[in-house]
Amino acid sequence: MNAKALWTAAFLLLTSPSLLAAQGFAGMGSDAEGFNTPSPDTALVFPADHGPHPDYRIEWWYLTANMKGPDGTAYGLQWTLFRSALAPFATEGWDSPQIWFGNAAVTTPTNHYTAERFARGGTGQAGVTATPFEAWIDEWHMRGADWGALSLSAAGTAFRYDIQLKAKGPLVLHGDSGYSVKSSQGQASYYYSQPFFDLSGTLDLPEGTIPVTGTAWLDREWSSQPLASDQTGWDWFSLSFESGDKLMGFRLRQADGSYYTSGTWITKAGGATPIPNGRFDATPLETSDVNGVAIPTGWQVVVPDYGVDVSVQASNAQAWMDMAVPYWEGPVRVTGSHDGIGYLEMTGYEQE
């Protein structure tokens, strides 16, 4: 397949509303013929699995952070590198079927700044190496000798950040030792996180340079068909409580109005326990008009097994990611049975 055909296919996959609706959000429910699919019998191996898996169709390196400036102002940060394959192999040069795209954002109490990049695999413009670890697209990067200490940078027209990350806890494997089921039909991904990063660095915003400190959560996930064809989007929560415990949970919205849910309870020492389908509940309490779309920006999250009954409120309701595939993502405040902070990602609302 020539370069023009590859780019055309990738663009259609990313932007066609009819295709997205018919094959799950962003085409993630379409048939994965020719690609590898996750198996519960496969053990994750580190540091090798920090690197790319070109025989799977899609994967990402996804970091979110809650930060504060010297005056106590709260900020949010996102850095994401996606790989999407049009065929299950990697080659050098412009015939590579690997497509890379990056999203970056900074959220303040009153503004939400975003940027987006696209690249082809095989040209050196974007990629990931496991040892030493480096993920990059153009001049954006996340790198370090290993996942214990990483540097992070990105820039858009109205922002820039340079951040240092230090891990203060272990990696967390979601689902069954990293095998994360996403539907009652059995679609799944490999999924793990480093939710214990401490953070320091600088934000450059229109008002100037701001030193920041905080915490960050780095997700890794890959699959070939992670969604069922009738799943229209998801609502994903990563919550860090003042107790030191953490909660990851998501609900996948299905065309008939039902949900598939999953989650992980993470102790402050790093112990992880799966939360099975139906035991994580997230209910919208209020919506906001965001880019002409009604987005739920206030939630009640309940996990009875761990005594969790909290209100999750967007710090800035207008945290809309106006990208090739648009979605909402931003920092949140948590109050109730557990107080804390976190991040919320919501996809698929533009198609509903």
Image (spheres, rainbow, N blue to C red):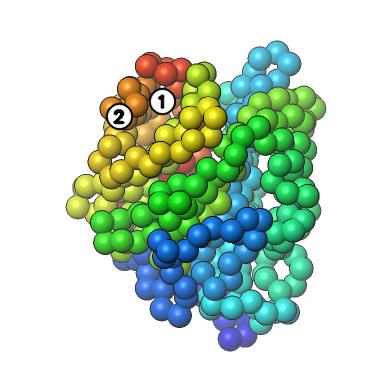
Closest to the observer: 201 or 297?
Answer: 201
Q: Which picture quadrant has residue 41?
A: bottom left
Q: Amino acid at mark 1?
A: Val
Crowding at dot 1, Cα within 10 Å, few <14 / some 14-19 / many 20+, comes out as many
Residue 16: image quadrant is bottom left
Q: Is 300 situated left or right of 100 in this image?
A: left
Question: Few, some or many C-alpha atoms within 10 Å of disc 2 (few <14, some 14-19, many ≥20)?
Answer: few
Residue 35 image position (x, y, % from top left): 47, 75
Q: Number of numbered discs present?
A: 2
Give the SS element for disc 2: helix
Residue pictured at 70% horizontal, 25% vertical: 213
Q: Are marks 1 and 2 in contact (CB under 8 Å)?
A: no
**Depth check: 98 or 43 in front?**
43
User: Farthest residue in the left direction?
Assistant: 256
Q: CA distance from mark 1 to mark 2?
A: 18 Å
The residue at 65%/32% (across/down) is: 168
Is 113 situated above or below 14?
Answer: above
Relative height, residue 114 to residue 102 (above, below): above
Q: Position of residue 232 (x, y in %)?
A: 33, 54
Compared with 3, 339 (above or below) is above
Q: Residue furthest bottom?
A: 1
200 up-or-down from 16: above or below: above
Spot occupied by residue 52 in the image (x, y as percentages of width and height): 62, 64
Q: Residue at x 58, y 67 (%)?
A: 53
Secondary structure of residue under mark 1:
strand
Q: Which residue is mark 1?
A: 312
Image position of 223 (left or right of 281): right
Q: Residue at x 76, y 68 (%)?
A: 124
Q: Nearer the viewer, mark 1 or mark 2?
A: 2
> Which residue type does callout 2 highlight?
Asp
Pointer 2: what residue?
Answer: 305
